[in-house]
């Protein structure tokens, strides 16, 4: 399956989530790219849009390959096989750096807006795709601490091996494609996969927040 761009993928994902329209849900997008899809989902489901910020820690010699992921509030998930081969000092510096970047993003995107309460509700975590799954697992742990009644991961594409692993962590995964032969990168599934800027994220969050507040 291929997608023209993130907007199209988001609309298709939103349709797959139609059963949750009007229910007590909070949509959590992973910035930056996931916010484009999250906005489409939130708009169709008439649900509030928030962020869960998880940062990949890339291999020291191959940055695109995730060896760990960390959230702004300290959740850390690592590839156990790779962890044994990493320099502890390098890893400590990387964790500090990526946590700081996660906090910067929250301040930049949401300023002093409080997180949306999700206790007892359904949390729907949205991203533009999954490769290793580490950033998503870290995000899942952060959301689980907020005590939702149910967590759903909604994504356009996921490798079948990662899909199996994630099902140990959550109640439900909604994926448009579970790839047995993964193409090697999320961008390979999109015709257009340009970087999403901070300004675009801020605009999407502002627009969706205005819609949500206007409907209440």
Image (cartoon, grey):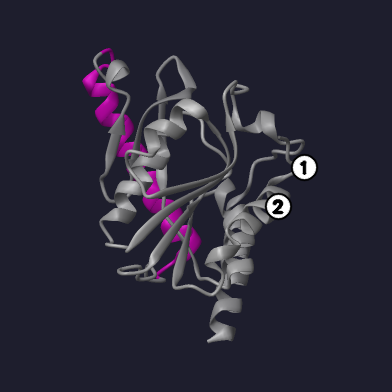
Residue at 63 percent of width and 22 percent of height: 183
Q: Residues within 10 Å of mark 2 (few under 14, many from 20)?
A: some
In the rendered image, residue 211, in percent from the top left (x then y), is placed at 61, 77
Q: Would you say the magenta stretch is mainly helix, strand or loop? A: helix
Separation of residues labelled 1 and 2 (CA atoms): 8 Å
Displayed quadrant of residue 164: top left
User: Total number of numbered labels?
Assistant: 2
Secondary-structure class at tag 1 = loop
Residue at 60 percent of width and 32 percent of height: 186
Q: Is residue 75 left or right of residue 56?
A: left
Residue where numbered disc 2 is placed: 7
Residue where numbered disc 1 is placed: 4
Q: Which mark is residue 138?
A: none
Residue 169 or 96: which is nearer the viewer? 169
- Is residue 106 highlighted in magenta? yes
Q: Which residues are magenta?
A: 85-112
Q: Is residue 125 above or below residue 75?
A: below
In the rendered image, residue 168, in percent from the top left (x then y), is placed at 32, 38
Residue at 30 percent of width and 34 percent of height: 77
Q: Residues within 10 Å of mark 1 (few under 14, many from 20)?
A: few
Q: Is residue 205 above or below residue 128?
A: below
């Amino acid at each position: 399956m291929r997608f023209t761009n993130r907007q199209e993928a988001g609309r298709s994902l939103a349709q797959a989530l139609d059963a949750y329209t009007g229910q007590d849900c909070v949509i959590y997008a992973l910035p930056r790219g996931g916010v484009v899809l999250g906005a489409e989902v939130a708009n169709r489901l008439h649900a509030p849009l928030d962020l869960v910020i998880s940062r990949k820690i890339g291999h020291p010699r191959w940055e695109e390959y995730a060896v760990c992921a960390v959230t702004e509030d300290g959740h850390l998930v690592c590839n156990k096989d790779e962890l044994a081969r990493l320099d502890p000092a390098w890893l400590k510096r990387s964790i500090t750096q990526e946590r700081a970047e996660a906090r910067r993003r929250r301040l930049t995107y949401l300023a002093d807006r409080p997180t949306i309460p999700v206790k007892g509700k359904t949390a729907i975590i949205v991203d533009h795709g999954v490769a290793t799954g580490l950033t998503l697992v870290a995000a899942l742990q952060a959301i689980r601490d907020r005590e939702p009644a149910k967590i759903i991961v909604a994504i356009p594409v996921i490798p079948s091996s990662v899909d199996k692993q994630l099902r140990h962590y959550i109640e439900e995964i909604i994926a448009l494609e579970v790839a047995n032969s993964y193409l090697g990168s999320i961008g390979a599934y999109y015709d257009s996969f340009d970087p999403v800027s901070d300004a675009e994220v801020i605009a999407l969050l502002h627009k969706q927040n205005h819609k949500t507040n206007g409907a209440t």
